[in-house]
Amino acid sequence: MAKKQEMTEELTADQVDTVDTFQGVEFLEARAVQRHLRRSPRKVRLVADFVRGMNVEKALAQLSFTKKGAADDVSKVIKSAAANLRDKFQEERLDNDTLFVKEILVDEGMTLKRIQPAPQGRAHRINKRSCHITVVVAKEETETSN
């Protein structure tokens, strides 16, 4: 526990927010979140799994030719995350071909519960599901020396 506190005290707030280290490789990253999207999370996850880990330019090209309705929503969030990264690090040259989708999550959002009249006075429940899409876009930097 004490080691963890020492490590976090050594880093400044800027370093914690902007640079993430994963297996000795530093990443410049930014994220974008689409909340309360009125699509089923199960359907959106199909599209999200398709582009996870891809280059941003390639992912947007693949999504433009995908016949799923959620493809437009996922590409919109990826574009937003890439724009957030460019805005966050304006001194760097960041093109879509140098960025990749580091992480993409589809979480379940609020469910609207509705009633459908059924025969003999019964009622069936209809769940109108929503989801949250979170995309983290990163640029691979350099390997750190240990």
Image (spheres, rainbow, N blue to C red):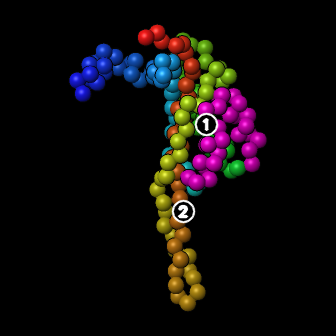
35 in relation to 121, above or below: above
> Could you say where residue 107 lies in the image, as x and y percent from the top left?
49, 48
Q: Name which residue lies at 31% across and 19% down.
A: 7
Query: Eyeballing the image, is 60 above or below 143?
Result: below
Query: Which mark identifies residue 128?
Result: 2
Chief secondary structure of the magenta portion: helix
Residue 64 lies left or right of residue 118; in this view the side is right
- Taking 47 as reference, is 30 left or right? left
Residue placed under numbered mark 1 in the picture = 52
Q: Which residues are magenta?
A: 41-67
Q: Nearer the viewer, residue 20 or 39?
A: 20
Few, some or many residues within 10 Å of mark 2 (<14, 14–19, 20+): few
- Residue lying at 73% horizontally and 37% vertically, measured from the top left: 62
Of the residues under marks 1 and 2, which one precedes in the sequence? Answer: 1
Report if residue 90 is visible in the image: no
Residue 82 seen from this side: yes
Q: Residue furthest left?
A: 2
Of helix, strand and loop, which one carries label 1? loop
The amino acid on which the numbered mark 1 sits, given as a three-letter code, is Arg
Helix, strand or loop at mark 2: strand
Mark-to-mark CA distance, 1 and 2:
26 Å
Residue 100 in the image: state x and y as whole percent. Answer: 61, 27
Which label number is shown at residue 100? none
Residue lying at 48% horizontally and 18% vertically, measured from the top left: 24
Confirm whether the magenta stretch covers residue 90: no
- Picture residue at 61% right of the left edge, 18% below the top: 94
Residue 39: x and y in percent read 59, 54
Quarter of the figure with the N terminus:
top left
